Amino acid sequence: MTNFNEFINKDYFRVNNPDHPFVYSGPDILLSDAKSLTALFIPSPEELGSSNKLLLRLINSKIGYPANTIMTLVLDHNKEFKNTDRVERDFFDLVIEPSDLKRLKSILKETKSISYFKDFKHTQKQLFDRQAMVQNSNLVYAEKVKFDKDKVEPFINKEKIQYFNYLEDRFEKVRSNIYAFENTLIGFKNLSKKPDLEELAPYYDFVLRSELFMKDKIPFFKKRDDAKCLSLNELPTSRFDPMKPMRLASLFGWLIGNINSEKDLEFRLNSYERSKK
């Protein structure tokens, strides 16, 4: 990020690689002053070749940060980037070159004010209402049930689910261990030595791909009728924010459990229904 120092106005309060309680992979730089909050996204070489990872970062940031945050793509015109038109039309509020950062304040003044707060905040309210309900259930469950199964394994004799991927605009088979069982989606993951946030990222990504889509820079939420359970061999945690993996799982609607049978699944679903009363 040091090569951007010369471009960014020193009047901004700046945070590199900001951490956010509801964002697992967000902007590269966050800038704030008395009038605005601007999130800068600087594509990695991998993201230049395939925009999906960048767009997942953007969607997660959109739903986590305040609705008036200016999501800004910083794109060097000398570097080739796929789907530029779609990215600018439906995803980012602003697309600039690195040198434009010198006059970012004047660019923001000239930019039309965001007029979609009502629709935007409706999506955020839907997601965070669900987050509060699911997290309460996850916390109650974790207090009552010991995660004593060293390994969780799929007990469902079916293929992995197919779903509509909004980023790719097509149906595809899920890559993670996620299956359909009656009216429930159930995922299985054995946490190992890698950071839990990294290991659970595909399950977060699945929800961003299948339940959220962007249109005219507004995120819309397609609520599922079926519950989602995520069977883990141990409770997820994080070094500096121990509750973050579970908080994010709850945001994306995952009921955490230690599930190795239909009986375990039925108990988890019933405990969720009880927690809603």
Image (cartoon, rainbow, N blue to C red):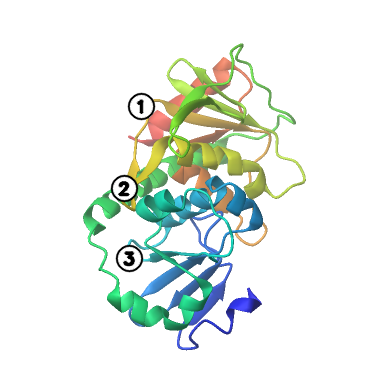
Question: Which residue is the site of mark 1?
Answer: 225
Q: Is residue 50 left or right of residue 94?
A: right
Tell me the kind of residue under disc 1.
Answer: Asp
Residue furthest to the front in view is 78
Find disc 3 in the rendering and name its residue.
Answer: 68
Q: Is residue 202 visible?
A: yes
Where is residue 72 drawn, in percent x and y? 44, 65
Q: Nearer the viewer, residue 236 or 32?
A: 32
Give the residue drawn at x 61%, y 55%: 242
Question: Which dot, 3 or 2, sits closer to the camera?
Answer: 3
Judge by depth and name the residue closer to the eye, 115 or 121: 115
Looking at the rendered image, the quarter that the C terminus falls into is top left
Query: Is 125 displayed left or right of 162 in the figure?
Result: left
**Residue neighbourhood size for the residue with mark 2, other residues' Cα within 10 Å, grouped as few (<14), some (14–19), many (≥20):** some
- Name the residue located 36 percent from the left edge and 50 percent from the top edge: 90
Q: Nearer the viewer, mark 2 or mark 1?
A: 2
Residue 20 pos. (x, y %):
51, 62
Q: Earlier in the sequence, mark 3 or mark 2?
A: 3
Q: Nearer the viewer, mark 3 or mark 1?
A: 3
Give the amino acid at mark 3.
Answer: Asn
Q: Count neighbours of disc 3 (C-alpha within 10 A) and say few if under 14, some if 14 to 19, many if 20 or more.
A: some
- Secondary structure, mark 3, is loop
Tell me, for residue 104, which label it has, or none: none
Residue beneath the point at 66% across and 35% down: 147
Residue that label 2 marks: 123
